[in-house]
Amino acid sequence: MNLRRDVFQAIADPTRRAILLMVTSQAMTAGAIASNFDTARPTVSKHLQILTECELLRQEQNGREIFYHINATKMKEVADFIEPFRKIWDDRFNKLEDLMKNYKKK
Amino acid sequence: MEPKTKVNAQDGKQELIITREFDLPLELLFKTYEEPELFEQWMGTKVLKMENKKHGAYAFETSHEGNVVFKANGTIHEFVPNQKITRTFEMENTPFPVQLEFLEFEKITDNTSKLTMQIVFKSVEHRNQLLQMPFAQGINMAHNRLQDIINKLK
């Protein structure tokens, strides 16, 4: 398991965001989720594993089946976090740095 | 690798601090704040006014596809080349009250420098609102893309 995995990495992937959106309205089994994608079942399982490790999804046993639920508390934590704001400034400052590195060479 | 730009927003404080170390000499870093044509390039905006002196004013606007999408202005209270800029910052046509900004420029080595930006808000709530705003846009964009993907799946 990759310990450096974080929630922002998790939501950076379009397939994983699609999965999150699907389970927002109702809990689903891995099979039901996978049936919405063209990709191979193990690929979807891998995505589910990552989302579960990041606590964005919760597993719940119901008889013989495992249902995936969205973890609303964790999602709220993501929304409250300052990372997007930091990213905006980081992009600006990277641009500034590149700009002046070229300027220096002139 | 540790991120180059850091944002520190402590719970319950109506300020936030942005710090960044640059692989640039102090003079070159300061120049990007001093010269309108450089400022325009890295901020991706158009400078309408920039009076770099005590009691001077500045204004800029950002356009997207021919429409002005963002306008901001402020007053400069202190302007000390290669050391500091103290100014207000106001986003026009938004409910956000004016902010107070303290920018400090420091030399680390001959080829590296550091910028510390302290932004003071009217209240803790206003600060938190601002922090959430870029993500709100980001998540809408993500949702739109998601919607596209899901529409294709149907």
Image: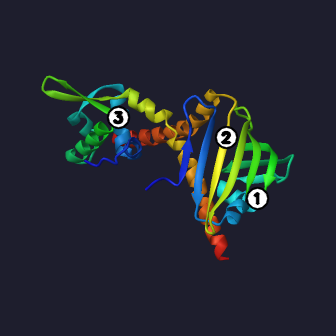
Read off the chain for label 1: B
Q: Residues within 10 Å of mark 3 (few under 14, many from 20)?
A: many
Read off the chain for label 3: A
> Relative to the observer, which residue lies in front, B4 or A66?
B4
Q: Are marks 1 and 3 on the same chain?
A: no
Under mark 1, the amino acid is: Glu
Specify the label residue A42 is tagged with: none
Label 3 vs label 2, nearer the camera? 2
**Which residue: 64% across, 30% down?**
B126
Residue located beneath label 3 in the image: A56
| Element under disc 3 | loop
Label 1 vs label 3, nearer the camera? 1
Residue, far top: A63
Residue located beneath label 2 in the image: B119
Residue located beneath label 1 in the image: B34
N-terminal-most mark, 1 or 2: 1
Using the numbered discs, state the Cα–Cα distance from disc 3 to disc 2 in whole angstroms: 32 Å
